[in-house]
Every structure is written in C-alpha cells, then in structure tokens.
Image: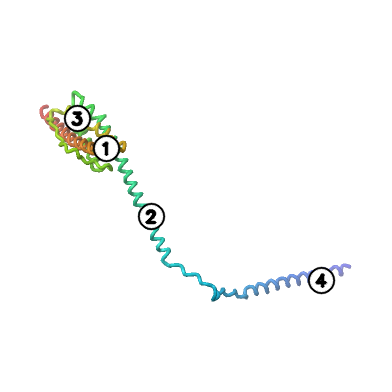
Amino acid sequence: MRRLNLRLSARIGVVLVAIGLTLMCSMSISAQKRKSMPSPPPSQPSPDTPSTPNTNPRSFEQAQLEMSILMSRRSVVTDLERERNRLAAELVRDLEQLQRLNTESIAPLSSSKTLDYKEVALACNEVKSRANRIKFYSPISLIDRTGEKIRYDFDDSQIGPMLSQLSRSITRFVENQVFRVSAPNDGELRSQAAHELEGIIKLSDIAAKSAKKLGKTLVAHQ
C-alpha cells in the first residue's frame, strides 16, 4: 500500500512538472511571435482624399512678434504710470516739507524778538532748496504767465518782515487748489502757483544772505 502511494505521488509530480513546462513554452512562443510581428506600415492617403495644407512656417513667428510689440507697449505705459506716480508722491512730500518748514521755522522766527541769524539762514536755505526742487521736478507744469515782476524792497535789517512775507507766500503756494482739484481755471491756478514759487525762491535767498551778513556783523562787534 505504501508503494502504491509513492507511485501515485511520483506520477502527480511528473504531471505537474509537464504542465508547468508546457505553459512556459507556450508563453515563450507567444512572446516571440509578438516581438517578431512587424508593425503595420503607416496608412497612405488615398488619391481622392484632399491633403491638409502645410502650416505657414512664419505664422508663429509673426504671432510672437505681435505679442512682443504688444507687451512692450504695455511695459512702456506701465513705466510711464509708475514714473508719474513716483513724481506725484514726491511732490506731495515736497509740499508737506515746505509747509513743515514754514510752520516750525519761518513763522516762529518771523515773530521772534531775538533772532539766531544762523538758524534763519539755515531755514531759508532749506526753503529755497525745497522750492527749487518743486520747480524743476513737479509733474504739474508750473509756468508763470502773470507778467508780473517779482520785486522786494527789504534791506538787510528787515529780517522779521522778510520772514513774515515768506511765510505768507509759502502758505498761499501750498494751499493753491491746483494741487488738490482739477478746475476750469487750472491754467490760471498754475500760473499763480508758479509766480508764488518764484517769489519764495527769490525771497528765501535774499533773507538767507541778509541773515549771514547780519550774523557776521554781530560777530565782528562782539
């Protein structure tokens, strides 16, 4: 009985091995067939089928050129807007600084009984520098068309009246509506602002030079 079982086990093992070998051989043959099978040739258009026209080789280049031109124009516009905004912001700061100089220095000095001529000269030179900056860098065109000549009849000893006049001129200039709203008389307002600005530049220069002279005279007499 034991021998019969061993014989059956041996036969079953041989059958399993044979089946495995058969499956392996069939898989190998099918794989070889797949590898050796040539790919079908590309289909040729029939004579009756109209051929698709070739794409214009310059169309992409033309589109690219047009896009480059468009973007460059937008870039130029953007740069101009950015520069205009920068100049506008600087004008606002210059006006604020001019008003601050008037409030903190010029107006108090104009009513002071004892003047520090060095301080007066320094303050007036700062006003002159800020006014010149506005004159040359303002995004708003400021051209004096009033036809009025700017004249001051102060002598060197009249520092107080000079400073009072300078303070009033700064106030009128800074508060000019041309810096706040667009009005029908915009041209007239610009002309007034330009005339006032020229007066500020000239008077601040006169006051600064007079203060320097008086300061030197005071030192000489000490």
Q: Which mark is residue 165?
A: 3
- Name which residue type carries label 2: Met
Q: Secondary structure at mark 3?
A: helix
Q: Which mark is residue 185?
A: 1
Q: Earlier in the sequence, mark 4 or mark 2?
A: 4
Rounded to the nearest angstrom, the CA distance separating label 1 from label 3 is 26 Å
Is residue 125 visible in this depiction of the protein? Answer: no
Q: How many marks?
A: 4
- Name which residue type carries label 3: Gln
Quadrant in the picture for the N terminus = bottom right
Q: Earlier in the sequence, mark 3 or mark 2?
A: 2
- Name which residue type carries label 4: Arg
Q: Which mark is residue 16?
A: none
Q: Secondary structure at mark 2?
A: helix
Residue farthest to the left, as pictured: 221
**As drawn, 196 above or below 52:** above
Which tag is nearer the camera, tag 1 or tag 3? 1
- Please name the residue that numbered disc 2 is placed on: 71
- Please name the residue that numbered disc 4 is placed on: 11
